[in-house]
Structures are given as C-alpha cells and as structure tokens.
Amino acid sequence: MENIYVGIDVSKYKFDTCIKNEINELLMKARTYDQSKDGMERFTKDLKEITNQNNILIGLEASGKYHRNLMHYLLKQNLRVREFNPLEISALRKGRIRKTKTDKIDAEVIADAVRWDVKTNTERYLADEEYLKMKEMSSIYNRVVSKITDLKIELHLALSSLCPGYDSLFSNILSSTSVEILKRSMKQTRLFQISEKEIIKILDRNYSNGTDIGKLARDIRDTFNNSTCPDYAKEALVTDVKFILMQYDTLKKQKQQIEKKIKRSVQKINPESLSIPGVGETTCSII
C-alpha cells in the first residue's frame, strides 16, 4: 500500500492542505479549512474518503501557537504527524523554480518535505504530552525573558534622563545590587537621598574582594549628585522607574516559577540533548 503525504500550512484562522501520493500526484485539490473543531473534523473526513489512515503521513510547519491545536487533534485521531522548523520549509521553498510564497504553495512544500522523508528532531516526541507541556512552558519562559529585556531598555531610557551615567556602572542594570540601590534612591520627597555609606553596605553584600567598592560607591553618588534632570520631569521619571522595578519583581518571580516547571518536565523526558556539556534544563527545552 503506497503512502499518502499531507502538507498543512496553518495560520490564525485557517489552514491550507495539500495531499500527494508517492509519485508526486495531487490526490486532492488544495483546500482551505477553518481553524476550528468543525474545520478539523471536515479535514479528517476528507482524508478518510481518499485512503485508509494507516498509510497517511502528515507534516505541519511550527507556526508559533497556531498549529498546536490542530496537531494535537490529529494525534488524538492516531494519525502520524511531523512538525517542521520554519527554517527547514523556507530552505525547501527557495529550492523551487517558482519561489512565490502563498499558503497553498507552502502546504505543497510541506507535503514534499514529508514525501522526501525529511527527518525532524521532534518527530518521536509529538505524541508525548510531557514533551508538549515542556514546549508550552518554554514558550512562556521566552515571553517572560523578552519582557524583562524590554524593561531593561525602558529603565536605561529613564535613567539616562534622571541620572546619566548610572547605568554604565553596572553590567546588568537589573542586577540585585542595582535594583536595591535604585529602590532606596527613588523617593519622590527624598530623591537620591542615599548615603555613600549605605551604598557601600549594599555593594559589600554582592561584590567580591576584587572590586573597589569605595570607588564604585563614589561613582554612583556622583551620578546622583550631578543629575541635570529638570525638576518638572523628576516626578514622572521616578514614577516610571518605580513601576519598572515593580514589574521586574513580578517577572523575576514568574521566571523562577516557570524554570522549576521546565526542570521537572525535562527531567521526566530526559532528552539526549541534556547530556551535552553546558546544556541545562531550560536551554534543553528551547533547542
């Protein structure tokens, strides 16, 4: 019995399909289905009209979250599914004589990828719900990290007006040391009223003996003392910095919580990549 190869290109509200046999013949004209339970049921019904499901191989391009509901539905129907990296499909598309990109053409490219027996490193995990759970957690982790990066940018901008030069004194403006100093300094009625002695105490808890803590404390005080920020802007900027630090505290807790969940999932799956030196659970969940 010859195999049937199905390529599916998924978007937010719909998915396009292409079905071929082993000699590259189209078995069904390209069709578009709604990204809904009804659309998924219509698609599987159309498949069954063409062939017995035991010889069907389906490929989907990983498209953020959009493909996951459909992929899960197909797996529950005991269909064989492969997930392709968008870079793999892009490379195959570039190899075509006609390089036009449409959803229907992408579905055909994915069908060809399955037909050519292109292997993917996730194929054996797709039916493993623990693996899928880990990937969902990894997606959340990436979003949290991205938000923290955005907060760093916002904090750099605010401090460049409020106390220019402060951010250049720290390799990470959101380090525990920097955050503690800022929290002690950002008060509407007593802006920058933190003594050099208090700064030294904070630095002493976080820096090694190789750091000239006294000089760093003086440099920090100098950025506060030499602020040229106009009075009318100070209240808004201090409020902005406070809000940024509050958001960071929340995101940091979320990041720690999601890292624990990822660690548990990765340890249950125990993938081969975990044996690579320097690759921890969080990195393993991403690659």
Image (tube, rainbow, N blue to C red):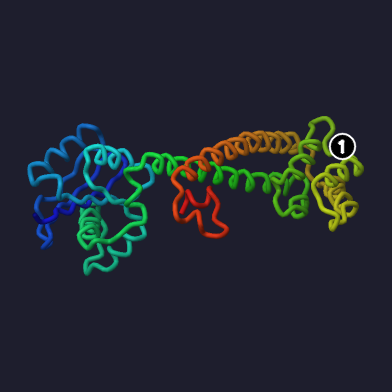
Residue 190, image x and y in percent?
84, 32
* Left or right: 171, with 98 as reference point: right
| Callout count | 1
* Left or right: 147, with 134 as reference point: right
- Residue 238, image quadrant: top right
- Residue 113, image quadrant: bottom left
- Residue drawn where x is 21% and y is 60% of the image: 112
Quadrant into which the N terminus falls? bottom left
Q: What residue is pinned by disc 1?
A: 193
Crowding at dot 1, Cα within 10 Å, few <14 / some 14-19 / many 20+, comes out as some
- Residue drawn where x is 77% and y is 39% of the image: 180
The front one of 124 and 159 is: 124
> In the rendered view, would you say 12 is above or below 187?
below
- Residue drawn where x is 23% and y is 57% of the image: 114
Residue 175, image x and y in percent?
71, 46
Three-letter code for the amino acid on which mark 1 is drawn? Gln
Residue 170, image x and y in percent?
75, 52
The front one of 119 and 61 is: 119
> In the rendered view, would you say 231 is above or below 121?
above
The secondary structure type at the circle numbered 1 is loop
Residue 98, image x and y in percent?
22, 66
